[in-house]
């Protein structure tokens, strides 16, 4: 399931599609780039997409020094990939806000990296 979500996010980003949360709906644009196949995948992963597109201001407070949870190697690897991809996009002058194509690609590749690291697999799924 996680691989499918990651692949969907990368595919949407590469197609230049932007996503946003519209309450309990996934909003996207431009509409003409979302064919029946992508629309089916968006619907199938609606809840997971909405969870990833959630309001960043609604997160938990940061823990006090030394009292936070232990972060796994997989999460560190995923964070590295995510911020590296966003950094490249930013340097190129691309929009990097939540739901932008660059953000979707970065998030999808970060999810792939996290899953591959956790399963001991190899990173680098080809999406087309």
Image (cartoon, rainbow, N blue to C red):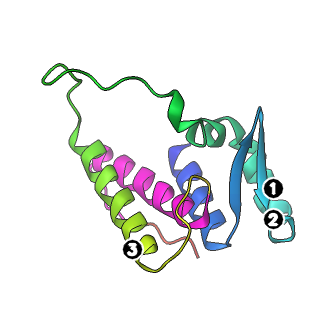
Q: Is residue 106 magenta?
A: yes
Separation of marks 2 and 1 at Cα, in angstroms: 6 Å
Mark 2 or mark 1: whose residue is earlier in sequence: 2
User: In which quadrant of the rendered image does the C terminus lie?
Assistant: bottom right
| Location of residue 113 in the rendering, given as x and y in whole percent from the top left corner | 36, 55
In the image: residue 16, left or right of residue 62: right
Label 3 secondary element = helix
Badge 2 vs badge 1, beta-carbon distance below 8 Å: yes
Which residue sits at x=55%, y=57%? 97
Which residue sits at x=38%, y=57%? 82
Numbered disc in front, either 3 or 1: 3
**What secondary structure prevails in the magenta region?**
helix
Where does label 2 land, which residue?
34
Where does label 1 land, which residue?
39
Label 2 secondary element = loop
Which residue sits at x=58%, y=36%? 55
Q: In this view of the protein, which residue sits in the foreground, 125 or 89?
A: 89
Question: Which label is found at residue 88?
Answer: 3
């Amino acid at each position: 399931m996680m691989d499918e979500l990651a692949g969907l996010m990368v595919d949407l980003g590469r197609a230049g599609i932007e996503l946003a949360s519209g309450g309990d709906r996934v909003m996207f644009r431009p509409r003409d780039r979302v064919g029946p196949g992508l629309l089916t995948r968006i619907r199938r992963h609606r809840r997971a997409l909405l969870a990833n597109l959630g309001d960043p201001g609604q997160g938990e407070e940061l823990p006090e020094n030394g009292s936070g949870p232990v972060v796994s190697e997989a999460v560190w690897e995923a964070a590295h990939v995510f911020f590296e991809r966003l950094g490249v996009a930013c340097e190129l002058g691309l929009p990097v806000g939540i739901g932008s194509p660059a953000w979707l690609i970065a998030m999808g590749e970060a999810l792939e990296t996290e899953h591959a690291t956790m399963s001991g697999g190899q990173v680098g799924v080809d999406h087309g």
